[in-house]
Image (cartoon, helix red, strand yellow):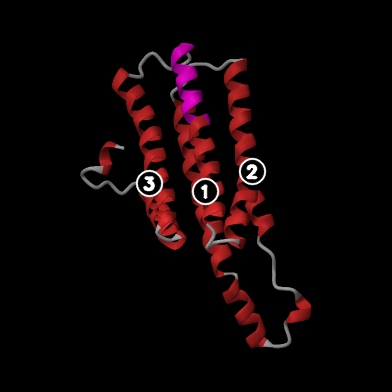
Amino acid sequence: MTLLLLELHVPVKETIHGEADLWRALAALGPQLVVYLMSFITLGIFWVGQQAQLNLLARSDRHITWIHLGFLFVVTILPFSTRLLAEFITFRAALICYWGNILALGVFLLFSWMYVTRAGLVNSDTTPADRKAVRRRIVGAQALYAFGALLCVINTYVSIAVIVLIQLHFAIGYRSRWLSRI
């Protein structure tokens, strides 16, 4: 997650000639900070999801280790898609690339869950309902993210706002009646 920080840059010293210049330069970083925060929350959500899966495992094997390394590879791409979105926040292509990164994270998380359940690596006390709930949460989250990304047809800011709301839902655990099933 700290890789994201490498994409935030302080204002160029030569362009700052006074306090007002620095404040303007910092204000100009606003969109980048929003996208950085989105990415940090995204990684946090996926990290918690992965940890929740790991807590349900009785054991591990070489295959799941490689699947998790694939997941980590996709994590390492997030600074690029974050920077792309921060630099081109009004461009739909940048938002779709960012969403594609989120989709890839979800695909790996789902694939790892499908593998561990089929390989018998899940704790024996994990109920079938719990197994379905994990899968439903991953698929539901991805469907919501896809909806948020599709809103870029209207406006990228609308799309980003919806994605942030989805992230907040999963990050702080708010449960509305219909979202509690996801």
Q: Residues within 10 Å of mark 2 (few under 14, many from 20)?
A: some
Q: Earlier in the sequence, mark 2 or mark 3?
A: 2
> Where does label 2 land, which residue?
77
Q: Secondary structure at mark 3?
A: helix
Q: Report the amino acid beneath label 2.
A: Ile
Image quarter of the C terminus: top left
Answer with left or right where residue 16 lies relative to residue 126.
right
Question: In the displayed structure, would residue 27 be above or below residue 163?
Answer: below
Magenta-drawn segment:
108-120
Answer with left or right where residue 111 lies relative to residue 16.
left
> Does residue 1 show up?
no
* Horizontal and vertical percent position of residue 135: 38, 28
Q: Secondary structure at mark 2?
A: helix
Residue most extreme to the front: 153
Residue at figure coordinates x 44%, y 62% from the top left: 157
Q: Earlier in the sequence, mark 1 or mark 3?
A: 1
Q: Distance of mark 1 from mark 3, alpha carbons?
A: 12 Å
Q: Residues within 10 Å of mark 1 (few under 14, many from 20)?
A: some
> Where does label 1 land, which residue?
96
Observer-nearest of 26 and 161? 161
| Magenta region includes residue 116 | yes
Query: Magenta residues: mostly which secondary structure?
Result: helix
Residue at figure coordinates x 54%, y 66% from the top left: 31
Q: Which mark is residue 147?
A: 3
> Does residue 26 show up?
yes
Q: Report the amino acid beneath label 1.
A: Ile
